[in-house]
Amino acid sequence: MHKNSLLIISMTVAGLFAAPKNEPVERIAEAARVFTEIQSVPDKGMPETLLKRANGIIIVPGLKRAGFVIGGQYGKGVFVARLPNGEWSAPSTVRIEGGSFGLQIGAGETDLVMLAMNEDAVKQLEKTGVKIGGDVMAAAGPIGRQLEAATTPIPASGLLAYSRARGVFAGATINGSTLRSDDSDNAIIYGRKVDQSDILSGKVKPTPAAEPLLSVLRKYSRENPSDEPPPKKTTK
């Protein structure tokens, strides 16, 4: 058989048995990309004063919306919590589903970000099947980098929500949705069955795939920019 034919056959067979993409891991990378893009827009991102105070962050890239009069939504994302040492926990994968009543004409995709501003909000959100708007209320978060943009009173529930659709970033109302941990995807990421509470409490260590997300969260939520270590000097 001709050598070129053998090469083509070998490449075809290799393609058939190639490992499928790891969607749960890719979701972590997508969450990092979305968060970076939102905070990279001058004066249009989430106030860093709020990010520094947040006890938890949920990022859902590409939340799907559809409906007429009665809307529906479904998406998968990641959930991280602030540890006692100030660092962020490993990411837990979550899914949000459900709907809300209102004039949601048409369909589209929205990037969703939620900030849990106290420990009680984190504890509520890590429960299985927590109802946003029932178990915990969410308020539309303020926009802007300046301190003045962060003076909006935080609701007693401690949960602020944001959305980005078609390039427009704004506070969001998401009451009526259900948030739950995606245990099967967490098992894929960590190689074993793990509880979301163990992930968010720091008992489960982050994988290397989580570093891009944790890095960008540290960048925008550290207490003092001067706390970031200086670049290493290169020797000639």
Image: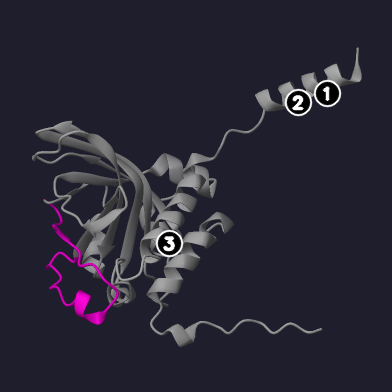
Marks 3 and 2 close (CB-CB < 8 Å): no
Q: Position of residue 223 (x, y in %)?
A: 38, 82
Q: Height in image: 185 above or below 79?
A: above
Q: Mark 1 = which residue?
A: 7
Q: Is mark 3 on a helix, strand or loop?
A: helix
Marks 3 and 1 close (CB-CB < 8 Å): no
Quarter of the picture containing the N terminus is top right
Query: Residue farthest to the top?
Result: 1
Which span is picked out in magenta? 134-158
Return the residue nearer the eye: 169 or 152.
Answer: 169
Return the residue nearer the eye: 76 or 2.
Answer: 2
Q: Mark 2 = which residue?
A: 11
**Residue type highlighted by circle 3:** Thr
**Residue type highlighted by circle 1:** Leu
Relative horizontal placement of residue 80, taking residue 190 as reference (left or right) = left
Return the residue nearer the eye: 96 or 190.
Answer: 96
Q: How far apart are marks 2 and 1 (CA)?
A: 6 Å
Q: What element carries label 2?
A: helix
Q: Where is residue 105 in the image (x, y as percent from the top left)?
A: 15, 35
